[in-house]
Structure formats: C-alpha cells, structure tokens
Image (cartoon, rainbow, N blue to C red):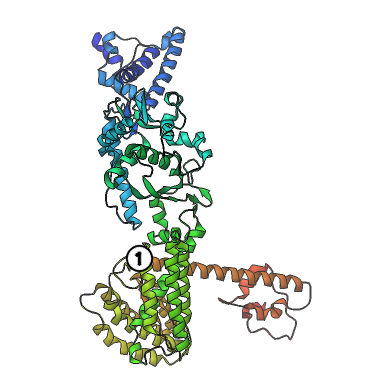
Amino acid sequence: GRGRGRRSLSRGGRTAPRHAAQAASDRVRPAVGAARRARADGARLVHCRLVGGEASRHLQAAAHLLRRARGRRRCAHRRPARLKLGSRKHRRRPRDGIRRDAAAAAGMASPPAVCDVQTAFVKLTLEQEASFFEDMAALNVRPPDAVTRVTDYVPEIVSYIETIARNGYCYEANGSVYFDTAAFTSSEGKVYGKLVDASALADKELLAEGEGALSASSAEADKRHPSDFALWKASKPGEPAWPSPWGEGRPGWHIECSAMMSDLLGGEVDINAGGIDLKFPHHDNELAQSEAYYGHHQWVNYFFHAGHLHIKGLKMSKSLKNFITIRQALQEHSARQIRLMFLMQPWDRPMNFSDQTVGAAKSKEAQFKNFFGTVKALIRSKWLDEEVGWRSREEDRALYDQIADCQSKCHHGFCDNFNTPQVVDALSSLVTYCNNYLSRPPPAAPAVYLVQKAAVYITQILKVVGVAEGADDIGFPVSSAGSEAEVEGPLDALTEFRDAVRSIARKKGPVEEILGACDAVADKVQASAPAAARLSDQVAKVLADFAGAIRAAAAGGHGAVLTACDHVRDDALTAIGVRLEDATREGQSSTWKLDDPETLMKEVAARRAEAEERAKQAKAKAAAKLQQEVDKLTAGSADPFETLKPDLQLEGGALSQADVEAWVGMQPPPKAKGKPTPEWLPASRAAA
C-alpha cells in the first residue's frame, strides 16, 4: 500500500508537496538561507562575470515567492479538495534538488556561483587592458615605454601615503585616509587648485565626481573639509581589498597616478596629459599630494588637456546613449581617416565626430592618395629621355617657393600649440598647387625631381602625425600583394593595349585594327610578368582575359569594345588593387596606381549608385516636363506627340511611345487623313 501511495503521489519522478504554501516555502528557503549566510560572512554572491547582480535578482524572486506562499497559506482551508497529502518522507528531498527548485523559482537554471571578488576584479581589468592595447594598435598608436598597473603598485601606494602622513598632510577616519587641503594650503608656498579659478574649488558636483562612491553622506561626514579627498578607501563587503596600516581597503583614484609616475619619472614631471574633464579635481589633486610627498612647490611643469569628443554636436556620454567605441568606428572608417579627422580639429577644443567631419577627412585622404599615385606614375615615365632641368623657369621656381612656404607653415604650426589643422591645410595647399602645375598643357613639361621633393616632404610629415606608415618614401602603404616595380611591366602593357583599342573604338575605326592590337599584345602577356611576383601574375591574367574579351567584343561593334574597356577598369583591375585613370587629353596615356582593393570596389559601387540616381532623376525630370507640355496641348487640335518629338531624347537614350503613355497616362489623339506618320511612331500605333 505504501508503494502504491508513493507512485500515485509521484509526477515524473518528483513527489507533490503537501500544499501550495509549503511548496513555495520549500523553493524559497534555500535562497534566503544562502543569502543570509553570505551576508553573515561578509561575502557577496557573484554570478560569473557580474558582481552582485544575480544575488539581487535571486533575493527579489525569493521575496516574491514568500509573499505568494503567505497568501496561499491564508486561503488554503477554502480549497481542501485540491490538495494531495503525502508522508513527511515523501516531502523531503535531497538538498541539491531543493537548490534546483529554488533556482527555477528565481528564473535561473542554477543558483548563482560564489567566486573570489579579488580574482574576478583582476581578471576583468586584464581583459580590458588587452582590449585597449588592441584598439591602440589598430589606430596606429605607438606603444608606451612602460605599462603600470595599480594592482602591482599597492605596496608602493601605501608607502607613499605613509610619507604624506608623516609630513602632516593627511588624516585617518573610519579606515579611510583623506588628504588635508587646509593643512596643505596653510603651508608656505603650497597652493591647492593651481589649474582652475576659485569658483571651481566650491563646485560640489566637481568635488563629488572626483570622489566617486566616497561622496556619500557617510564619507562626507568623515572629512574635515569638503575639498578633502581620499588617499585610501576602506573597502566594503564584496569590493577588492588590500592590507594596509588603516585596515583592508583600496587606493584612492588620484594617489595611484602620483605613486606610479613618481616611481618612473621621479620628483619632477615635464608633461602630464589627459582630457579636459581631468583638469579638476584629478590633476589638481595629483599636484597637491605629490608636492606634499616631495616637499617642493611644483611637480609637473606642463599640462595638456584635450577637448571633449562630441558625437554630432553633443558631448559623448553613456547617459545620452550617443557613445561609439573605437572598434565600432573602425568598422565604418579606416584608422587613417579617423586620425586625419582629429588632426583637422584643434586638439585642445571640443572635437566633433560626425558624418561631415569624417567625410572631410576621407576627401583629404583621397586628395593625398591620388597625388602620390600621380607622382609615382610621373617618376615611372621615360622623362629622362627628354630635356631635363627647370625648363619652365617661372613656374618651376614658383613651385620651389611653394614647397619652402609649406615647410615653414608646418614648422610654425607644430610650434604653435601643435596646430595640426594649420599643418594639414598647408600640405593640402601644396598638393593643389602641384596638381595645377602638372596639369599644364603641352609643351610645358614638369620638373620631376621638384615634384618628387614635394611628395617626399608631404609623406614625411604625414608619418610624423601617424597618418602614413611603412618604409616607402612617397605615399601610403598599399595592401595589395606587390610593389610598383613588380607590376610595372604587365600593367604598362595592359594600359597601352587598352588605350589603343579604346581610341580605335571611339573613332569608330576598322575592326581589323582592334584584332591586330589583340595579336600584338599576345606576346607581351608571356614576357611581362616576373615568375615570383604574385600580383604580377594576377595582372598578366587580367591582361590575357582582357585581350580575349576585346577579340570577342569586336564582332559586336565599337560600343561593345568600349564596354569591355570599362569593365576591365572598374571590375577586373579593382579586384586586384589597381586603380586605372583614363587620360583627360587626347594623346595622353592612362595612369595606373596601386591601391587597396576594398577601397577601390567601394568607390566603383558609389560611382555606379550615383550614376543610377542621376539617370533616374533625369528621366523623372523629362517625364514631368512631358506631362506639363501634354497637359497644355491636350485640349488643342495639334498632335502633342508630334510637337514633343524633339524632347524625347534623353541622356540614357530615347523615350519610347510606351514610356510616354505610361508617364502621361493618355492615348495619342487620332491622326488626320493624309498626314504623314512620324518615323518614330511604331507601325502598330500608326495603323490604329
């Protein structure tokens, strides 16, 4: 009988509780007990990575179930028929099972784990440190000479505070140690708040921000003066803690920097830098405690305070939810573009991150990149076969003066508070002047070495500010797998062949000439590429495929040949990182430049999208014009289609009769007898 009762009370291997109130109590009791034991031990529940979060949710769920249990216990006598009773033996469960039930009641798969706060704290900081250095490397920021961690400097920090105490500039209260600003300012030659005016010293919000969690009323009561700040903080349960003469605690925010900098740089620091929000109280507190430690009157000679970063005009902050991480920014923009964007704004004023500022940086990058490619193409040309020297006396000397002027502006810009916007403007102006100098019509010939001098200087300055990198004397490094020297032969052959067939097609020359050019380039395909150059092999393959495409397109007419020329420029060459620019004058050769394949493909996609949008707008504009004219002529006797025939030619081709009817939503009026049928009107419509 007891066996049958046991089975009848079992559901899926779990015994039903005596009543609903007992069930809720069984689920909650382990959670409440665990929380009480954790509080009694001064510990804190930690769930994997989030300190204290799961414990709080666990307790809230426990309290909710207790309230429900009490309510059910009060009304249990009203529904006795719904309750199934079992023996006490059946109601008892193993302790692990109770914990699982409690966890399920709290909405979790298992109870929160208890781990060492100190270990979790150090692990988290190391993860963030590694992420930070990865971001700095991605932005092309040079690594520091030394890396310091507060967790490695706690003994030195304690010793630092003890020295300040011996000098009489701090006091202890309830396990925390505070810097005594009144004792400091009363000493001869000591000034607190050197970096700000007197009004900032009375700003309670700034003072509270400098103290963080210690700005609570209990901590404020321990201070002798509102401007006093913590050197050592007594740790609360669940916070990281280290031993000290004043009890378990952790260093204050400001003392960390003084102790670590003093260890590496000594009693005098030339330059200290940070954001403008660190000016007060952080940097002023650094000065006060360090001067109290060394006993002198000046610890730092110069401070650099960078402006806040604004996102589309508003200060970046988590409260506004307008912040962006470095990795998010690098998904949309390159490190070079981000660095240029900041260089184009004063470093000590608010800097704006917006579509406009990033767009300006991208335009500046494109200007420099195109100029470097043009200069490299000029150097590759056979200019030494011609007369050399400054043949255009006035223009050449003017270019030389422009280079010297740019060098002077860059020097004075760096000396004037690191005025990087002035430096970038000077470089950009020199590029514009050089481009105008190179675009002069024949017979004017450029002084190649003079243009090369300008390109080398611009590259050197861009390397100084971290925009250009690598060992190249001119320009930015290219991510394609090869150098100009390796691909010069096959790319020159491809460019010459394309220029030849393109010229024949534009002049509507005979197809035999196009086929002859294909035959002539066949030998160059075999001899142009070095065997060990991977990019050269790719270029040679593109050349061979292009020659075959031209041979096949010749049968389709000159339009098909021109289409094949556009395809090799916009698709085949961009895929392997080659930018091909068509000549702007008759008789000139096209220019090839190495570039990043992804950048080139994005540019081609953007140009095609713009062309499609222009064609769409042109067609809509023409259709609107047709609609207006047809509306005017509909009531008259004149044939509107015959009247509008000259307007039917558009940039993308002629509008058909069906296009017109679709736009104006009408049928053509009947034709008068004997009137000739317009040649553009389809025969089927004329018969109607």
Residue 454 location, x and y as percent?
A: 39, 76
- Amino acid carrying label 1: it is Lys
Task: Report the residue at 68% width, 84% height from top.
Answer: 677
163 vs 511, nearest the viewer: 163
Q: Residue furthest top?
A: 77
Task: Give the position of the C terminus as an image quadrant.
Answer: bottom right
Q: Quadrant of residue 31?
A: top left
Residue 229 location, x and y as percent?
A: 41, 32
Using a 10 Å C-alpha cutoff, classify the residue at mark 1 as few (fewer than 14 neighbours), some (14 to 19) or many (20 or more): some
Assign a secondary structure to mark 1: helix
Residue 344 location, x and y as percent?
A: 47, 61
Q: Quadrant of residue 517?
A: bottom left
64 vs 335, nearest the viewer: 335
Task: Give the position of the N terminus as an image quadrant.
Answer: top left
Q: Residue furthest front?
A: 188
526 left or right of 466 in image: left
Q: What residue would you read off at disc 1? A: 463
Q: Residue furthest left?
A: 532
